[in-house]
Image (cartoon, helix red, strand yellow):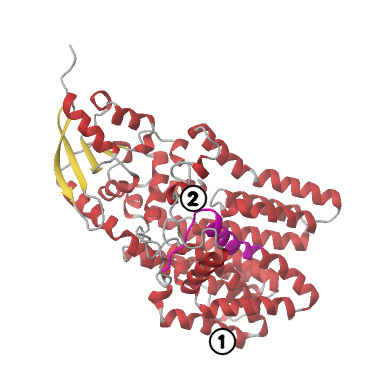
């Protein structure tokens, strides 16, 4: 039913909108519409799957239900599983998977949910819908938030979980209720199944619950309940790695871990706190702009000093919790083989890209947004000036501050080129239900583009069957096509098969500047049957 102009201006409607429930409902509507338009914009721009990780996340979700070996084994060992589970209802539809919308839609929904929880939490912290509106706008309308919230990355799901933790811990601090405690516990578990940052937060949240509850027995029992529920996430992942890979810490020290990928290559910030902070802050500046960072810092100080002792106490935990996010990434740069590269800080290490892991700087944005929300407590004029200051920088230099989009563009050009060329050549050559063997996961984008079911492909994700095919091709290699890069293990299998069969002949070579050539082979005969 449409709402008439008179009803919109009625005291009852105005009262509902200004109430906590009404303001959250209005926020939910605005955020949902914003993210829907953002996801549609990036889809129409053709950039939904520019991030290699975005393509991989969506295809990993698809493999759980569409693979030669479907099931939990397709969760892999490194990326945590919750985002992939949440994508399954969407990527199971062929058209949504083929276009990338199967990953974009749930991501946009998750970022909407994140914004709602953030609004509700800030509103409780400052008892102000204006502060919550300003803080949410600073977070959600940042171009990097809109982009990462519109593509199949893990950031939207993580922010939804972390902001739920923020909301329920703030609520628990006010009510000491079991409902808030269960909300914190479930949200923390979700965070721990989304990104490893969530594991880092768990002991701090447990400590907060332990010191903020009522009565010693209730504090201990409540904290114990939280630990039991929240620990389900890490326990599941350790068990998953132990069951499928024989090592509960395979995600940390296996061949696809950050430590293995980085190897012994030096990078700025590793073992150097000064450089680690410098690179993180520079990425943050490019992502949010100095005005947002400066106003956020001023706002945090204002929140502590300008509202009396009770207000200062209520702000300590939200500030501390959100400050843990950038602290985690600075520590990660220093100690955990996770570098950040930005073009404005040229590293003295040859071969490093100009953009790498810039999205880690998103960790600074919620803290800055909270601080700017505190400034809005001084009234609408202060709120308006703060927003104009923050967004004027972004509007004047939109490309510079869309740093995650730039990273996805620069680092994916070669991959996009050979994916498009290969798919274009194959679509005129392949027949129905033909099968493929592929050497590495990035090639899955070729099959997605062509709409080829992943059950018709054989890759390293199929474990034993793939190993048997590449080690004993004369017996176990039966695919119609092979797509390889020179020197990879499938190329080696084809070379060994030339003697005893099956025989594959080169049909096409795809060359892209700066990348190894991609070679497409077609099976031309079956090996003779044994007498």
Q: Position of residue 162 (x, y in %)?
A: 60, 58
Q: Say which residue appears at 42% left-offset and 40% top-offset.
A: 64
On screen, residue 252 versus residue 408, left or right, reads: right
Classify mark 2: residues with Cα within 10 Å, few (<14), some (14-19) or many (20+).
many
Q: Is residue 44 above or below residue 52?
A: below
Q: Magenta segment: does it hold 219?
A: no
Q: Position of residue 329 (x, y in %)?
A: 55, 60
Q: Calculate the distance from the C-alpha at mark 2 to the C-alpha at mark 1.
A: 37 Å
Q: Is residue 448 above or below residue 293?
A: above
Specify start and end residues of the magenta stretch as a single range.
321-342
- Look at the magenta stretch and give its main secondary structure: helix
Q: Is residue 349 visible to us here?
A: yes
Q: Quadrant of residue 63?
A: top left
Q: Residue furthest bottom?
A: 381
Closer to the camera, 467 or 24?
467
On screen, residue 267 versus residue 7, left or right, reads: left
Mark 1, secondary structure of its residue: helix
Label 2: which residue?
83
Classify mark 1: residues with Cα within 10 Å, few (<14), some (14-19) or many (20+).
few
Q: Magenta segment: does it hold 322?
A: yes
Q: Position of residue 392 (x, y in %)?
A: 47, 83
Q: Position of residue 22 (x, y in %)?
A: 62, 70
Label 1: which residue?
385
Closer to the camera, 471 or 393?
471
First of labels 2, 1 by sequence position: 2
Q: Say which residue appears at 56% left-offset and 81% top-offset.
A: 6
Q: Is residue 236 above or below residue 361?
A: above
């Amino acid at each position: 039913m449409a709402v008439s102009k008179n009803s919109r201006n009625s005291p009852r409607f105005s009262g509902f909108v200004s109430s906590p429930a009404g303001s959250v409902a209005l926020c939910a509507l605005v955020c949902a519409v914003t993210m829907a338009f953002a996801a549609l914009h990036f889809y129409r721009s053709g950039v939904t799957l520019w991030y290699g990780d975005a393509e991989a996340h969506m295809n990993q979700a698809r493999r759980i239900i569409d693979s030669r070996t479907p099931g939990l084994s397709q969760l892999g060992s490194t990326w945590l599983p919750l985002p992939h589970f949440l994508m399954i209802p969407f990527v199971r539809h062929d058209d949504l998977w083929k276009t990338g919308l199967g990953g974009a839609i749930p991501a946009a929904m998750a970022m909407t949910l994140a914004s709602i929880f953030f609004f509700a939490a800030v509103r409780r912290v400052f008892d102000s819908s204006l502060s919550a509106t300003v803080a949410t706008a600073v977070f959600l309308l940042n171009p990097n938030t809109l982009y990462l919230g519109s593509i199949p990355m893990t950031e939207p799901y993580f922010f939804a979980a972390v902001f739920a933790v923020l909301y329920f811990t703030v609520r628990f601090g006010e009510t000491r209720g079991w409902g808030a405690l269960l909300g914190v516990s479930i949200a923390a578990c979700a965070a721990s199944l989304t990104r490893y940052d969530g594991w880092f937060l768990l002991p701090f949240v447990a400590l907060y619950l332990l010191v903020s509850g009522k009565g010693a027995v209730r504090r201990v029992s409540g904290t114990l309940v939280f630990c039991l529920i929240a620990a389900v996430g890490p326990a599941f992942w350790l068990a998953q790695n132990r069951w499928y890979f024989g090592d509960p810490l395979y995600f940390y020290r296996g061949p696809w871990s950050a430590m293995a990928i980085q190897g012994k290559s030096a990078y700025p910030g590793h073992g150097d706190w000064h450089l680690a902070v410098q690179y993180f802050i520079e990425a943050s500046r490019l992502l949010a702009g100095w005005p947002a960072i400066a106003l956020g810092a001023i706002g945090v100080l204002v929140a502590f000093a300008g509202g009396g002792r009770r207000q200062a106490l209520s702000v300590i935990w939200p500030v501390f919790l959100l400050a843990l996010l950038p602290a985690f990434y600075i520590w990660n740069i220093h100690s955990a083989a996770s570098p950040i590269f930005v073009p404005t800080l040229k590293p003295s290490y040859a071969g490093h890209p100009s953009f790498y892991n810039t999205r880690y700087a998103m960790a600074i944005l919620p803290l800055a947004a909270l601080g700017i929300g505190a400034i809005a407590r001084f009234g609408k004029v202060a709120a308006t000036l703060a927003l104009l200051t923050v967004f004027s920088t972004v509007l004047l230099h939109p490309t510079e501050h869309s740093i995650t989009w730039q990273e996805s563009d620069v680092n994916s050009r070669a991959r996009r080129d050979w994916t498009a060329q290969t798919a274009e050549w194959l679509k005129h050559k392949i027949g129905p239900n033909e099968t493929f063997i592929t050497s590495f996961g990035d090639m899955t984008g070729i099959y997605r583009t062509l709409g080829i079911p992943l059950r018709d492909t054989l890759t390293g994700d199929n474990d034993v069957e793939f190993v048997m095919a590449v080690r004993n091709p004369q017996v176990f290699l039966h695919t119609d096509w092979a797509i390889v890069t020179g020197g990879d293990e499938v190329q080696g299998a084809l070379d060994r098969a030339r003697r005893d069969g099956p025989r594959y002949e080169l049909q096409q070579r795809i060359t892209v500047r700066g990348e190894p050539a991609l070679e497409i082979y077609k099976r031309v005969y079956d090996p003779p049957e044994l007498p």
